[in-house]
Amino acid sequence: MGGVSELFFFMLVIAALAFAPLGYFIYKYTQKNGKPFGETEPHGDSPSFVNDLAETAIHFLKTRLSKK
């Protein structure tokens, strides 16, 4: 019977370790009124080097293709 008790204990420890990140996320999510990462800007409102580079490349291609 000791083997079953040990197995049960180790399975509980493994389950606690496996679900700890989920519990932490739920804790942080409920802490700040549904904003787990604080005040964040909506996507697209902040300037981005990658977005600027992509817009420049698209504009360059449009000008090159329209000349032909």
Image (spheres, rainbow, N blue to C red):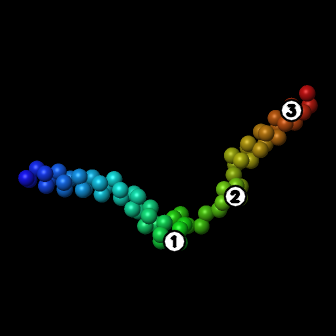
Foreground residue among 15 and 68: 15
Which one is earlier in the sequence, the residue at label 2 or at label 1?
Answer: 1
Secondary element type, mark 2 = loop
Bin the neighbour count of mark 3 within 10 Å (Cα to Cα): few under 14, some 14-19, many 20 and up.
Answer: few
**Image location (x, y in percent) of residue 35:** 54, 66
What is the quadrant of residue 26 in the picture?
bottom left
From this view, report whether residue 58 is shown above or below residue 40.
Answer: above
Task: Provide the residue designation for mark 2.
Answer: 46
Task: Provide the residue designation for mark 1.
Answer: 32
Which amino acid lies under the numbered mark 3 shown in the image of this protein?
Answer: Arg
Identify the residue at image location x=66%, y=60%. Answer: 42
Identify the residue at image location x=39%, y=57%. Answer: 21
Which amino acid lies under the numbered mark 1 shown in the image of this protein?
Answer: Lys
Which amino acid lies under the numbered mark 2 shown in the image of this protein?
Answer: Ser
Task: Provide the residue designation for mark 3.
Answer: 64
* Distance between the alpha carbons at the discs numbered 2 and 3: 29 Å
Q: Nearer the viewer, mark 2 or mark 1?
A: 1
Residue projecting furthest to the top: 68
